[in-house]
Image (tube, grey):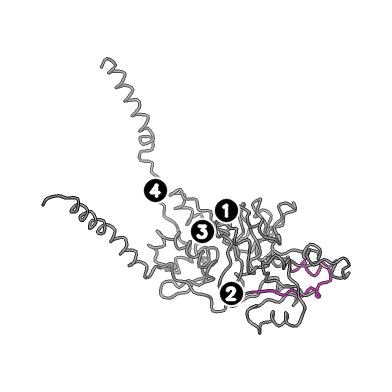
């Protein structure tokens, strides 16, 4: 153990460098996003499914929607209280949630999720460019 | 208890069942009613078991008669207009007789037919070669109504279908189509770079009780209906008129008929 000093110094430097990102970003965590609802969405009160379910499972729902629409030609979704909805991202979801930047993007950015929905689906049909 | 191989295996077996029973039971319990598994067909949806089309080319004189039809389709489906021929996207387009019906070209042809613009599109074949080659099942024949459809989400852009289609009915998006759209129809999505596209017999319009865009724009020159129903408009037209189909000898059984 002649090189004890060198080894300990090396270890200290190593640990310091490895944990640097944690120290550096301490207390700087981005706040949990609060997606904003549009007036229309607030007035509607209910989504196609309970909000809790939509929050965690909307991607599965959309995935099933696209299969039922394209493959089975079934386009009407029977939601809560037997309310009918057209299974369409651009024409149903975005009709209410027309504020993509404040609604979709908020959480997607936070979770670093980059869905490619908007490469094809028109993100704001009502907006005139 | 003396431990033996037999006892060890017994205990191991019982534990395996115990561990695996829970997920299986859970799966059964949850399969009953999932919110996403509820879907209905629209009440005003048009129904058929085999959609087909009869194009009466006697109604066409020149390109001016066909262009509005093409425009109507391309407008509804957000089909971009690219000037570069190699990047061209087309769902329905004009073709002259020699190219549309290369197996039916006589040495001497009727002058009207020889120079007539034929509107050509995806034939929605009964034995569609594009569906057979698609490695992801992005292109498929819908069993319920015989339409050869595409699920753009699944297309990986391998272009096997383009090689397989004998009618050239498919186009590949070499570029992002959005900048080339003059106006967008917000009811229908656009496509992205790297996917193949083609005519979908207006499946989205049929689902809400509308006839295909080309049929509506054709002033009666194009008829659309159920080929399986002997009383349908298309079957009546087929009975009364002599019709031809494109490259029939290939055996793909096109669903688009031409009265010449």
Q: Residue furthest left?
A: B1
Q: Label 1 vs label 4: CA separation?
A: 37 Å
Question: Circle 3 sits in a helix, a strand or a loop, which is it?
Answer: loop
**Residue occupying image coordinates x 73% and y 67%:** B246
> Is A27 covered by the magenta stretch?
no
Q: Can residue A126 be seen in this view?
A: no
Q: Mark 3 lies on which chain?
A: A
Residues at circles 3 and 2 in contact by the CB criterion of under 8 Å: no
Q: Nearer the viewer, mark 1 or mark 3?
A: 1
Between the C-alphas of marks 4 and 3, the distance is 20 Å
The secondary structure type at the circle numbered 1 is: loop
Where residue B208 is drawn, which disc sits there?
A: 2
> Do the residues indicated by labels 4 and 3 lie within the same chain of the protein?
yes
Q: Which residue ends up furthest to the bottom in the rendered image? A: B231
What residue lies at 52% left-to-right and 67% top-to-bottom? A92
Q: Locate residue B230: give its quadrant.
A: bottom right
What's the distance in space between the residues labelled 3 and 2, CA to CA?
27 Å
Disc with the residue nearer the chain's start (4 vs 3): 4
Q: How many labels does the image show?
A: 4
Choose mark 3 or mark 2, whichever is in front: 2
**Left or right of A102, for residue B92:** right
Q: Is mark 4 on a helix, strand or loop?
A: loop
3D distance between C-alphas at marks 4 and 2: 44 Å
Tag shown at residue B156: 1
Residue on which disc 4 sits: A31
Magenta segment boundaries in residue numbering: B51-69
Residue A99 is marked as: 3
Q: Is disc 3 on the same chain as disc 1? A: no
**Element type where label 2 sits in the image:** loop
């Amino acid at each position: 153990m002649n090189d004890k000093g060198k080894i300990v110094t090396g270890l200290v430097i190593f640990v310091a460098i490895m944990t640097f990102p944690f120290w550096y970003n301490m207390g700087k965590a981005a706040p949990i996003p609060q997606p904003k609802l549009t007036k229309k969405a607030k007035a509607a009160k209910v989504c196609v499914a309970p909000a809790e379910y939509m929050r965690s499972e909307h991607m599965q729902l959309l995935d099933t929607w696209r299969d039922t629409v394209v493959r089975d030609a079934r386009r009407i979704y029977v939601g809560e209280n037997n309310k009918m909805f057209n299974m369409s991202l651009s024409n149903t979801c975005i009709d209410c949630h027309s504020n993509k930047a404040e609604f979709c993007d908020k959480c997607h950015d936070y979770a670093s999720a980059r869905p490619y929905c908007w490469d094809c689906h028109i993100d704001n049909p009502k907006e005139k460019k | 208890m003396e431990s033996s191989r037999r006892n060890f295996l017994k205990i191991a077996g019982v534990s395996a069942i115990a561990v695996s029973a829970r997920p299986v039971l859970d799966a059964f319990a949850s399969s009953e009613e999932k919110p996403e598994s509820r879907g209905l067909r629209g009440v005003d949806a048009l129904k058929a078991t085999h959609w087909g089309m009869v194009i009466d080319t006697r109604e066409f004189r020149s390109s001016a008669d066909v262009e509005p039809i093409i425009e109507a389709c391309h407008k509804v489906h957000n089909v971009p207009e690219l000037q570069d021929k190699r990047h061209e996207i087309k769902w329905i387009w004009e073709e002259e007789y020699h190219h549309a019906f290369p197996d039916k070209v006589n040495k001497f042809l009727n002058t009207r037919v020889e120079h007539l613009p034929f509107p050509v599109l995806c034939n929605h074949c009964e034995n569609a070669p594009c569906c057979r080659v698609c490695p992801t099942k992005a292109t498929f024949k819908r069993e319920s109504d015989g339409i050869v459809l595409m699920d753009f989400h699944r297309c990986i852009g391998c272009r096997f279908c383009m090689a397989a289609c004998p009618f050239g009915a498919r186009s590949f998006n070499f570029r992002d189509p959005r900048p080339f759209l003059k106006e967008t129809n917000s009811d229908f999505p656009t496509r992205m770079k790297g996917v193949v596209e083609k005519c979908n017999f207006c499946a989205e319009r049929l689902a809400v009780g509308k006839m295909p865009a080309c049929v509506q724009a054709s002033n009666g020159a194009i008829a659309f209906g159920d080929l399986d129903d002997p009383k349908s408009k298309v079957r009546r037209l087929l009975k009364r008129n002599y019709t031809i189909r494109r490259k029939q000898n290939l055996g793909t059984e096109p669903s688009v008929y031409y009265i010449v």
